[in-house]
Image: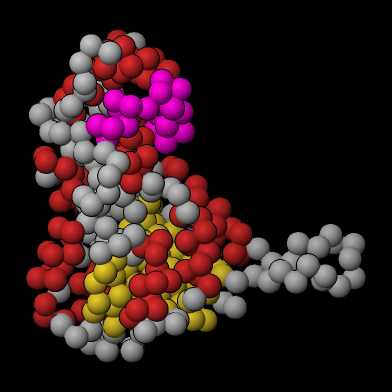
C-alpha cells in the first residue's frame, strides 16, 4: 500500500521521517523518492532487511540512516541520529515477504521441514522451538488464546504437550500436524494452523509488548501537522492502534457540569481515517498479504 502510505504521510519538503519497520524498504524508498530534500531514519530487527536496504536505498545515499534495532527503541535511535522532532512516521507491522518466504526462518506453516525459529532478530535467544517444547500447557493455552484468538487453544496446547513427552518438536511441519489433529474435522482447513503460528511468532518477538506506549511516544515528537501511518495485519495490533489514536484524539474529560476544565487534557491528534484504509482489489491480487492490511492515519494538531 505504498501509494496510500505516501498520501497519508503528506510528505513535506525538508521533512524528517521515521520508518520503524523497514522490511523490504519499499516504503522507505518511496518516501525518499517523493522529495529530494527529505531525510529518513529507519529501523528493523532483521539483519537481512538492513543489508538489503543498504543496497536498495544506495541511490539516496546521505539522506538516510539505518539502525538494526526494535522500533520501540526510537528514542535512542533518534538521539543518535541527532533528531528531536519528526514530520511523520510509519509503522508497517507484521512480517516481511522475505521472512515468510525464507524457509530457514521458520515462519511459514506450509514449509514442512523448516526449523521452529520465527525470530525477527536472529540474535535473540528465544525461538519458537523453545516456546513449543518448554512452555507449560497453561502458558501455551494462554498465548494461543490471547495472541492467536484460537478457539481450540486448550486442545492444541494439550496435544503439543503430549507429543513432546515422546519426542522434541523441531519443525514447522510437526507443529502444523499437531495443531490440525487437535482441531475437530469439521473446523479444519488448509490454514487451520495459521492462528497458532501467529501466536507463537508474537510471543517469540514480543510484538505487542509496549506497542501502545510506543505509539503515544512517537506521536509526542511529531511536529504540528505531522502525520502518523500505521499498517496492521491482525485484529490484536489494530485494536491497540485504534485505542492509542482514540486516547490522543480525546480532549477534556471533565464532567459536563464543570464550568471550566480542571483536568488539563487537550486533544493532540485528529484521526484522518474514521475507518481504516484497506488494499485495492488489484493489490490484493498481486500481493496476497495485503488482504488483511489496515491502514490508520492521524495528524498532530497540538
Colour scheme employed for the rendering of this structure: secondary structure
Q: Residue at x 18, y 27 (%)?
A: 170
> In this rendering, would 86 be left or right of 44?
right
Residue 117: x and y in percent read: 21, 38
Give, as a single range, the part of the protein colored magenta. 128-150
Q: Residue at x 34, y 60 (%)?
A: 70
> In this rendering, would 300 be left or right of 15?
right
Residues 117 and 197: in front is 117
Residue 34: x and y in percent read: 25, 80
Residue 231: x and y in percent read: 36, 56
Quarter of the picture holding the N terminus: bottom left
Q: Residue at x 29, y 78 (%)?
A: 40
Question: Height in image: 44 above or below 236?
Answer: below
Q: Is residue 187 visible?
A: no
Q: Is residue 300 visible?
A: yes
- Residue 160: image quadrant is top left
- Residue 74: image quadrant is bottom left
Question: Height in image: 160 above or below 8?
Answer: above
Q: Residue at x 14, y 71 (%)?
A: 54
Quarter of the picture holding the C terminus: bottom right
Report the predominant secondary structure element of the magenta stretch: helix
Residues 75 and 277: in front is 75
Question: Height in image: 290 above or below 39?
Answer: above
Whether the magenta-drawn stretch holds residue 130 is answered as yes
Question: Height in image: 135 above or below 69?
Answer: above
- Residue 249: image quadrant is bottom right
Whether the magenta-drawn stretch holds residue 144 is answered as yes
Residue 264: x and y in percent read: 75, 71
> In this rendering, would 12 be left or right of 128?
right
Amino acid at each position: 500500500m505504498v501509494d496510500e502510505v505516501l498520501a497519508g504521510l503528506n510528505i513535506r519538503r525538508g521533512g524528517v521521517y521515521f520508518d520503524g519497520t523497514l522490511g523490504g524498504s519499499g516504503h522507505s524508498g518511496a518516501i525518499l523518492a517523493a522529495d529530494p530534500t527529505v531525510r529518513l531514519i529507519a529501523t528493523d530487527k532483521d539483519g537481512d532487511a538492513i543489508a538489503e536496504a543498504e543496497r536498495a536505498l544506495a541511490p539516496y545515499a546521505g539522506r538516510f540512516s539505518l539502525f538494526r534495532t526494535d522500533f520501540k527503541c526510537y528514542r535512542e535511535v533518534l538521539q543518535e541520529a541527532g533528531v528531536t522532532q519528526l514530520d511523520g512516521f510509519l509503522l508497517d507491522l507484521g512480517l516481511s515477504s522475505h521472512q515468510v518466504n525464507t524457509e530457514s526462518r521458520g515462519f511459514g506453516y506450509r514449509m514442512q521441514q523448516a526449523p521452529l525459529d520465527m525470530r525477527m532478530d536472529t540474535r535473540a535467544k528465544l525461538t519458537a522451538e523453545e516456546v513449543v517444547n518448554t512452555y507449560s500447557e497453561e502458558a501455551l493455552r494462554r498465548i494461543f488464546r490471547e495472541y492467536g484468538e484460537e478457539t481450540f487453544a486448550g486442545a492444541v496446547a494439550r496435544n503439543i504437550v503430549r507429543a513432546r513427552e515422546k519426542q522434541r518438536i523441531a519443525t514447522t511441519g510437526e507443529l502444523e500436524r499437531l495443531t490440525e489433529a487437535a482441531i475437530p474435522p469439521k473446523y479444519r482447513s488448509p490454514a487451520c494452523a495459521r492462528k497458532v503460528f501467529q501466536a507463537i511468532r508474537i510471543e517469540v518477538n514480543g510484538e505487542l509488548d509496549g506497542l501502545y506506549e510506543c505509539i503515544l511516544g512517537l506521536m509526542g515528537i511529531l511536529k504540528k501537522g505531522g502525520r502518523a501511518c500505521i499498517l496492521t495485519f491482525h485484529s490484536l495490533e489494530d485494536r491497540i492502534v485504534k485505542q492509542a489514536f482514540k486516547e490522543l484524539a480525546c480532549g477534556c474529560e471533565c464532567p459536563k457540569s464543570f464550568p471550566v476544565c480542571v483536568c488539563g487534557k487537550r486533544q493532540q491528534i485528529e484521526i484522518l481515517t474514521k475507518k481504516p484504509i484497506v488494499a485495492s482489489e488489484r493489490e490484493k491480487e498481486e500481493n496476497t498479504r495485503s488482504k488483511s492490511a489496515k491502514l490508520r492515519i492521524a495528524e498532530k494538531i497540538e
